[in-house]
Image (spheres, rainbow, N blue to C red):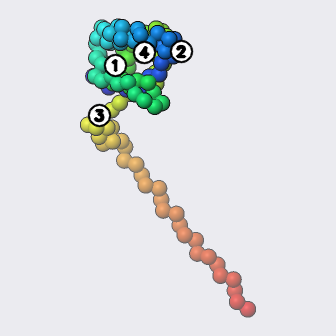
Amino acid sequence: MNTYIALMNLTDQGVRTMQQSVERSIKGKALMKRLGGRIKAYYMTMGQYDFVVVFECPDDESMAKFLLAVGAWGAVRSSTLKAFPVPTYRRILHALPALEKPAPKRRRGRRRAARR
């Protein structure tokens, strides 16, 4: 399963219908389950974002379907990140081709002005 982190903000509509947010959350959880994923963590936050949600989903396509559907409800906007756990990050690093170090710059000797 892939991990995704959604940074969410309420829209104007979401603020006006905040009392329905629990129902929307339940509906979102059911949709994610139908797509083969799950919500790992859900936080209301203070600061730049109103909510941070951590998902596990089988693939990018399923996650995109979820985000488009939830976005169409009109209550939230999201910026979503695909997250890589440390073991995956290490595999990515080890699979990088050997990077050549740039050749050191040659120091050119300075010509001294001839003394008269």
| Amino acid of disc 2 | Asp
- Point 70% across, 89% down: residue: 115
| Amino acid of disc 4 | Leu
Q: Is residue 101 above or below residue 15?
A: below
Percent x, y of residue 64: 41, 16
| Amino acid of disc 1 | Asp
- Earlier sequence position, callout 4 versus callout 1: 1
The Cα atoms of the two marked residues, 1 and 3, are separated by 15 Å
- Point 33% across, 42% down: residue: 93
| Amino acid of disc 3 | Pro
In the picture of the structure, the residue carrying the numbered disc 3 is: 85
- Earlier sequence position, callout 1 versus callout 3: 1
Relative depth, front residue between 17 and 66? 17
In the picture of the structure, the residue carrying the numbered disc 1 is: 59
- Earlier sequence position, callout 4 versus callout 2: 2
The Cα atoms of the two marked residues, 4 and 2, are separated by 18 Å
Kindly state the secondary structure of the residue where label 2 is placed: helix
The Cα atoms of the two marked residues, 3 and 2, are separated by 34 Å
The Cα atoms of the two marked residues, 4 and 1, are separated by 13 Å
Q: Is residue 6 above or below residue 75?
A: below
Closest to the camera, between mark 4 and mark 3, is 4
Percent x, y of residue 114: 69, 86
In the picture of the structure, the residue carrying the numbered disc 2 is: 12
Whether residue 51 is visible to the viewer of this picture, yes or no, is: yes
Kindly state the secondary structure of the residue where label 4 is placed: helix
- Point 26% across, 37% down: residue: 87
- Earlier sequence position, callout 4 versus callout 3: 4
In the picture of the structure, the residue carrying the numbered disc 4 is: 67
